[in-house]
Amino acid sequence: MLASASPMDAQTLRDRARARYPEFLETLEAMVNIDCGSYSPEGVNRIADMCERRFEEHGWEVERRSNGGDPGLGDLLIGRLLGTGGPNVLLVGHMDTVFDDGTVAERPFRVDGDIARGPGVSDMKAGLLAGFFATHVLQDVGFDGFGTITYICNPDEEIGSPFSGPVIRDLAPEHDAALVLEGARENGDIVSARKGITDFTIKIVGRAAHAGVEPEKGRNAVLQAAHTILALQGLNGRWPGVTSNVGVVHGGTRSNVVAERCELQVDLRSPELASLEEAEAEVGRICADVSIPDVSITMDVHGWHRPMEKGEGARRLVDVAVGAASELGFELRDATTGGASDANTTSSAGTPTIDGLGPIGGDDHGPAEWVDLTSIVPRTALLAAIISRV
């Protein structure tokens, strides 16, 4: 162990990350070649087994939680590495992917030049491993100037973290900073702000009737849905950055029957909590405004994520990251994105948060998903430097 190495020496961290690169790549291949969709608990738990062994081999305390009797999700892992004193740092990465069982057989891990491909290679096997290897690098150079590094390995992020989200929310306030390990943007940007998301299921009930013989006895739920859809789509841009999307419509049974029922599924997003709450209230007002007599509308609301806003704490973390990147020889910028992650949870819990700290990748959730292998060493060193400077 290089006890004399300075934690502020970014080049030393890079050298150690480079020395560990072959191990990183070997482990990345092993992880990518495991089917571990959110609803494939056996596969997710194989990833959890690999993470648990790595925690134990490097001196972490490990807690493993099963999902309270629900067999449809994998286990949650929480690793804790104790230091000699200093800030408490939270790392968050997820072990699940969006892909069904059998995807690995169709397109296993492969390397094309400087690009690695395979299911979950960017989202987020590379980021998950970056969290481990950044802490390995810090241990290699003898850095222990922190209170605790807590690493949450999430089994269900791709379905909104229903199991792990409350755990992350509870633990986040105990930490001075949260570093979320989703992949960097394709241009290398990290993420300092994410939109919040609220989903609505809107059910419209009218009255069925024969469309040719006595249509006047009917109350057309699909017609009411058309009015409601136009109003919901009209929310786009009413507040800066707010988007409203009616993504799914189910209604009616036959063309010769006045539609008795229709269901809408709506995605509402906003970069700020205040405008999100105003838009949510407006969706409620729209659903209370019934244009077709004797038609009823009910609304089921699920707030997946509150916004991740770039507050003062996040700005300071961005400054730390930008400074470390400069020492490592590359320019770094931060960006806002419309997608949500566990960073929304840590940020809304009041913990300064930045995201996109994994290696550079793209085409997530699709067959062309990739990660830039040349970004693994500098991004791992960057993460290690940020942890050492919180």
Image (cartoon, helix red, strand yellow):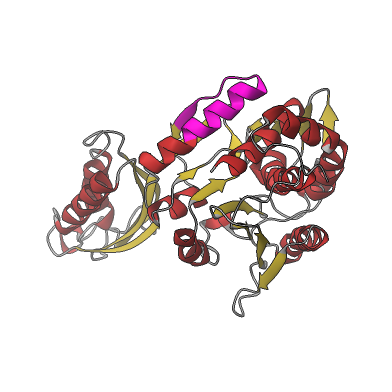
Quadrant in the rendering for residue 107: top right
Work out whether residue 367 can be spotted.
no
- Residue in the image at 40% along x and 57% along y: 349
What is the magenta segment's predominant secondary structure?
A: helix
In this view of the protein, which residue sits in the foreground, 364 or 256?
Answer: 364
In this view of the protein, which residue sits in the foreground, 3 or 148?
Answer: 3
**Is 101 above or below relative to 294?**
above
**Is 266 above or below relative to 25?**
below
- Residue in the image at 64% along x and 67% along y: 73
Residue found at the far bottom of this picture: 69
In this view of the protein, which residue sits in the foreground, 224 or 179?
Answer: 179
- Residue in the image at 82% along x and 48% along y: 33
Report whether 302 appears left or right of 36: left
State which region is magenta: 318-335
Quadrant in the rendering for residue 263: bottom left
Report whether 326 appears left or right of 130: left
Residue 167, given in percent of the width and then of the height, sits at 52, 66
In this view of the protein, which residue sits in the foreground, 346 or 103?
Answer: 346
Total numbered circles? 0
- Please say whether residue 159 is one of the residues in the magenta stretch: no
- Residue in the image at 76% along x and 54% along y: 35
Quadrant in the rendering for residue 372: top right
Residue 193, given in percent of the width and then of the height, sits at 42, 38
Report whether 193 appears left or right of 85: left
**Is 379 above or below relative to 308?**
above
Residue 244, given in percent of the width and then of the height, sits at 32, 42
Work out whether residue 136 can be spotted.
yes
Residue 151, given in percent of the width and then of the height, sits at 63, 57
